[in-house]
Image (cartoon, rainbow, N blue to C red):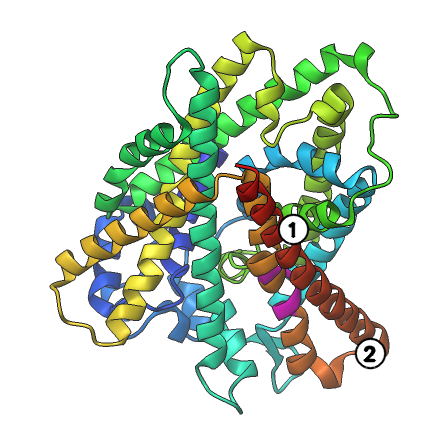
Amino acid sequence: MLRLWLRWLGTQVEVLRNYRFGLRTEEESLGFAQQDELSRTYGEEDPGEEEQGSPCSLTGAAQNTASPKITTWEAAWNVTNAIQGIFVLGLPYALLQSGYLGLVLLVLAAVLCGYTGKILIACLYEDGEDGTPVRVRNTYEDVANACCAGLCPRLGGKIVNAAQVVELMMTCILYLVVSSNLASHSFPFIPISPVAWSLVTFLTLVPCMLIRDLRVVSRLSLLCSVAQFFITTIVIVYCLTQAHRWSWRRSPIPVDFEKLLVSVGVIIFSYTSQIFLPTLEGSMADRAGFADMVTWTHALACVFKTAFSLLAFLTWGEETKEVITDNLPPTLRIAVNLCLLAKALLSYPLPFYAAAAVLQGCVGQCGATWLGVQEGSLVLRAGLLLLTFLAAMYMPHFSLLMGLTGSMTGAAMTFLLPSLFHLQLKWKKLDNKHKALDFLILVLGSLCSLSGVICSIKGMSKAFGGR
């Protein structure tokens, strides 16, 4: 297991390097290659190749030689880390809001997310002269640009990048919200207001502005995985010891429709991984095994999330809180919350780093030279950090924020865009069954996204009004 973790760190670095969709400058690309010893351990591009263009501009064959190859098991580990994060702890509360219908939604979301992940990868390929599939695109952005080529060559990529930045920033805000919540619940004997705790967590994360080495982010990701395993194991074991308290009649019936729609967004957000899949599939030694890997990783995630949510809900019923660890007994809760607090703070740099890199690349493409590269990067990161802090302080509702993010960018990146791109790029090759399925996902995803956003905003308005 330790060897698998270490190899995963190397592949995670490569995924992060390609994650910026080619928006960084050539100088930045070479700098990352020179700084990152983990990438060199698992195979690094020749600097001359790096200077010729971004990873997005490489042909399929060139990318094959440039990227380190990973096994199917290592690819599965990356997908599992993407869909089994800290936000799993909000699923029991989503089950409380949706009743036992939430169990059906957990299974349905896993099936649909697995399917859209496969069709997104299918959009990377076109048939060659001999009829065999050839990888002609490398990223989500490439697929979007191909679909919008007749309208506006770069429009699709800009939409994808905008959705990506919004999702990353919302993820950072969620980490800050849960960190402040955990800090206040872990130290109830310290007379500090929730706003003060938000400021404390913000100050703890100020050093994130100075992170320029991907090795730091990768090491923090490993610590997060260990902490996540420890926390979920404790919650499950405690729930099993309380089996005598379980009651199957604790579900609120009838279910509030608005709360149900918010829960749909929470569940969707817990399965989002599509943005990573093109780069991950391109790094696999056996790409033919990608579809099966996505199927069984999502199946296992579905089993775990369903069991975890159900055990917690049966244990606490209507007393289930937004972050399930707040339901634990005081002594155990403090220990687990401190561990969870550390995980949340260690998880923040990954989306923050990626969002800053994308925005910095966009600023560079626009030709902004009002500050030097170093000064401009520092100002941008400081602005992002301050923005996430202000948003977390004024929107301190974990489940509502998670539902809003899932309904907005999560549904778009996971359901709407993959099905839309698949229909446009593969229309002539699809049979009626797959066309109908793609249309169904597109319609249902649009309805759930729009209604979920409206209900999440209404829920926030009510929460603010109750202050």
Q: Residue visible at 42% across and 15% down?
A: 187
Q: Quadrant of residue 87?
A: top right
Which label's residue is closer to the chain start, 1 or 2? 1
Which disc is residue 431 wearing? 2
Count neighbours of disc 1 (C-alpha within 10 A) and say few if under 14, some if 14 to 19, many if 20 or more. many
Q: Residue visible at 53% across and 62% down?
A: 278
Overall secondary structure of the magenta stretch? helix
Q: Is residue 139 magenta?
A: no
Residue at the extreme bottom: 150
Q: Is residue 330 above or below residue 56?
A: above
Circle 1: element type: helix
Q: Is residue 455 above or below residue 183?
A: below
Q: Quadrant of residue 302?
A: top right
Q: Residue visible at 78% across and 23% down?
A: 314
Residue 179 on image: x %, y %: 43, 31
To which residue does mark 1 refer?
Answer: 265
Disc 1 versus disc 2: nearer the observer: 1
Horizontal placement of 430 versus 89: left or right? right
Circle 2: element type: loop
Horizontal placement of 12 versus 205: left or right? right
Residue 199 on image: x %, y %: 32, 33
